[in-house]
Image (cartoon, rainbow, N blue to C red):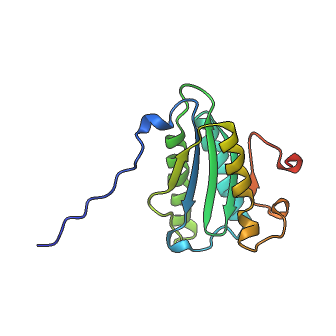
């Protein structure tokens, strides 16, 4: 008889994602396939992301769509904010869209995340993520990369 493989549960409890928390996420496309190279797809995903953030009372300190993954830094704006529900709602809605329109692409089941503890860590995380397209050789300067944004900052004024 075969060995039963149990699914690993997410390491943080759901309460860690509620209220005034700041959480960094990396969501990957299954098999690291490049789907975020099409401006129309990125625009649909960006709009869905902003709708879910509004619905769950969250700010997005930043989003950055690399060809095969998405970086997010999300903060709850109220005691009732639910960051986990926001991310899961986004993945569900966009996953369904992929199933209907680009069935060869799927989200990876889980994601990487961690909680930001202070403003210095937040700034370092944002700067590190902004450099991702430079490290990958997509652009020379992060400001050239089009698939990024924030509901908090104007990156045109970011130094």
Place of residue 133 in the rendered image (x, y in percent of width and height, measured from the top left): 73, 66
Place of residue 79 in the rendered image (x, y in percent of width and height, measured from the top left): 55, 25
Q: Which residue reaches farthest left? A: 1
Place of residue 156 in the rendered image (x, y in percent of width and height, measured from the top left): 88, 50
At x 54% / y 70%, what residue is drawn? 105
Residue 16's place in the image compared with 65, above or below, is above
In the image: residue 112, left or right of residue 144 = left
Is residue 64 or residue 51 the one in the foreground?
Answer: 64
Is residue 132 or residue 38 the one in the foreground?
Answer: 132
Q: Which residue reaches farthest front? A: 120
Quarter of the figure that contains the N terminus = bottom left
Residue 1's place in the image compared with 61, above or below, is below
At x 47% / y 36%, what residue is drawn? 16
Q: Is residue 35 visible?
A: yes
In the image: residue 152, left or right of residue 5 = right
- Res. 7 image quadrant: bottom left
Q: Which residue reaches farthest right? A: 157
In the image: residue 1, left or right of residue 123 = left
At x 72% / y 45%, what residue is drawn? 123
Residue 81's place in the image compared with 122, above or below, is above
């Amino acid at each position: 008889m075969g060995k039963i493989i149990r699914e690993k549960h997410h390491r943080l409890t759901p309460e860690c994602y509620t209220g005034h928390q700041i959480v960094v996420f990396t969501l990957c496309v299954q098999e690291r396939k490049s789907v975020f190279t099409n401006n129309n797809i990125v625009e649909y995903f960006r709009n869905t992301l902003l709708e879910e953030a509004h619905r769950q009372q969250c700010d997005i300190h930043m989003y950055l769509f690399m060809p095969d993954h998405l970086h997010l830094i999300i903060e709850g704006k109220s005691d009732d904010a639910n960051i986990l529900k926001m991310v899961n709602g986004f993945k569900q809605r966009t996953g369904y869209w992929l199933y209907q329109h680009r069935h060869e692409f799927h989200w990876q089941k889980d994601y990487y995340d961690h909680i930001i503890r202070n403003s210095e860590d937040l700034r370092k995380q944002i700067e590190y993520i902004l450099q991702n397209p430079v490290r990958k050789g997509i652009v020379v300067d992060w400001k050239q990369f089009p698939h990024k944004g924030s509901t908090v900052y104007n990156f045109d004024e970011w130094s």
